[in-house]
Image (cartoon, helix red, strand yellow):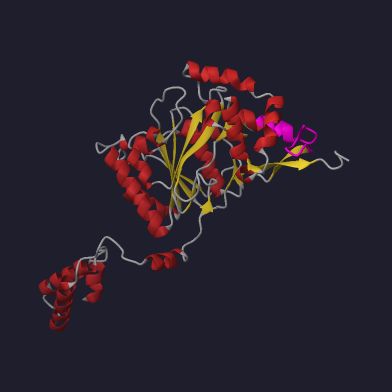
């Protein structure tokens, strides 16, 4: 009897419900064991008396820290733009190259490739990529012959399925069990919502489900979404996430890919949310093109978003004309007082940009020329001839004046 009952009710996920069903079956069974029936009835009564499970956990702050110490560390999948375990959203306008970038990210995390656009990845595992955008012919036209790994698994609409127009979180769970993947790329959530009458509710349901998978199983997801039409010259922000800004509440990272005013093939990536680290500074500039017969991106380098926005007013045009107001000689004249003590690169660039009414990038270029070997010399406040040096790398670098050896002997 117990084995038969367990098989009958094996799909129940609530112990109390299972016990209740077993009791009912035992009562209806002609050969029911009276002792077994009594035991089951007693157990059902005990379960019914238990308080309901609370949806919240109660812990002290110290207990939370202790449990956090046992969790796996964050691992970069696509630099800090997407980490595991975590949920990231990649948004962009139609035709900007979201899907092309997402396919290369999928290749990055499923192969020994160490980086993409200068952003590292420490993963090499199966990724489940849902493609609800491209047909087979379109995918082949873009990537035919590309050396994809067997770990790169693609899911798309099954044309013979009875519910081909419906896609839910439960489908994702089933496919993860089928493939063994723990990385998901969804292209794209806004298109999926249009396949049902629930619209935003469908998207929110999927995001809530992916968050549960992240917390319970360490599943990491990259979700593609659209941006609405944006007026030229407007910097990207979370407000430009199409569909529902509430989607970003479930995300650990949100970043955009956008077209640049510098050329038809120039793109830039901008991160607008990072729950665990500082947001990526500035933007990452790249160029869309064909290499080895495949569509992809090549890295140009870091930049500032303002340099890639189309001018929308006379004020911006006027500011561009003021770039010539930061000649080397003028910048040199300001350095002795500004560098009386060493200064962080960002602080010095901001001060000079404000003084000359130009962009920080223009000042950065001037300082690179000045600090280059043999670039230029200045006299400090003690009338000592000095070179301008940049110490350190990236955001931690500092500028200082270093006396030129033997110059005053």
- Residue farthest bottom in this picture: 35
Does residue 134 lie above or below 396 as drawn?
above
Report the residue at 29% width, 42% height from top. Answer: 202
Q: Which of 405/37 is in front?
A: 405
- Quarter of the image for the N terminus: give it: bottom left
The stretch drawn in magenta includes residue 383: yes
Left or right of 72 in this view: 59: left
From the viewer's perspective, tell me whether residue 59 is left or right of residue 357: left
Instruction: Return the x and y of residue 311 as percentages of the image width and height.
Output: 50, 19
Residue 146 position (above or below residue 93): below
**Can residue 332 be seen at all in this image of the molecule?**
yes
The picture places residue 308, in percent across and down from the top left corner, at: 54, 26
Which is nearer the eye, 243 or 149? 243
Magenta range: 365-385
Q: Is residue 224 magenta?
A: no
Seen from the viewer's position, the closer of residues 126 and 305 is 305
Q: Quadrant of residue 268?
A: top right
Q: Position of residue 306 (x, y in %)?
A: 53, 28
Q: Name which residue lies at 59% across and 31% down.
A: 360
- Quadrant (top left, top right, bottom left, bottom right) of the C terminus: top right
């Amino acid at each position: 009897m117990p084995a038969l009952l367990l098989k009958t009710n094996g799909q129940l996920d609530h112990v109390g419900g299972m016990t209740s069903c077993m009791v009912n079956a035992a009562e209806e069974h002609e050969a029911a064991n009276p002792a077994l029936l009594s035991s089951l009835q007693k157990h059902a009564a005990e379960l019914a008396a238990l308080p309901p499970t609370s949806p919240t956990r109660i812990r002290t702050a110290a207990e939370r820290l202790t449990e956090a110490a046992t969790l796996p560390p964050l691992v970069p999948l696509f630099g800090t733009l997407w980490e595991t375990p975590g949920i990231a959203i990649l948004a962009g306008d139609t035709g900007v190259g979201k899907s092309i970038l997402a396919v290369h990210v999928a290749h990055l995390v499923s192969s020994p490739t160490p980086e993409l656009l200068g952003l590292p990845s420490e993963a090499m595992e199966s990724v489940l990529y849902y493609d609800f955008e491209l047909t087979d012919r379109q995918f082949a036209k873009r990537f035919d012959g590309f050396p994809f790994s067997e770990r790169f698994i693609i899911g798309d609409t099954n044309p013979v399925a009875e519910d081909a127009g419906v896609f839910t979180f439960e489908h994702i769970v089933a496919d993860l069990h089928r493939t063994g993947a723990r990385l998901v790329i969804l292209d794209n959530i806004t298109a999926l919502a249009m396949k049902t009458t629930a619209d935003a509710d469908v998207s929110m349901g999927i995001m809530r489900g992916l968050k549960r998978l992240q917390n319970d199983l360490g599943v990491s997801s990259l979700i593609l979404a659209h941006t609405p039409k944006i007026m030229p010259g407007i910097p990207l922000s979370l407000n430009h996430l199409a569909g529902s800004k509430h989607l970003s509440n479930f995300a650990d990272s949100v970043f955009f890919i956008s077209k640049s005013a510098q050329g038809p093939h120039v793109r830039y990536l901008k991160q607008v949310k990072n729950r665990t680290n500082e947001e990526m500074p500035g933007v990452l500039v790249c160029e869309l093109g064909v290499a080895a017969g495949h569509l992809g991106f090549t890295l140009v380098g870091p930049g500032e978003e303002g340099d890639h926005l189309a001018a929308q007013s006379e004020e911006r045009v006027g500011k561009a004309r003021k770039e010539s107001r930061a000649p080397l000689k003028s910048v040199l004249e300001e350095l002795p007082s500004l560098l009386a003590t060493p200064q962080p690169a960002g602080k010095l660039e901001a001060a000079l940009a404000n003084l000359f009414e130009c962009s920080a990038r223009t000042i950065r270029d001037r300082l690179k020329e000045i600090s280059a070997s043999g670039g230029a010399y200045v006299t400090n406040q003690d009338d000592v001839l000095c070179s301008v040096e940049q110490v350190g790398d990236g955001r931690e670098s500092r500028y200082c004046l270093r006396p030129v050896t033997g110059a005053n002997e």
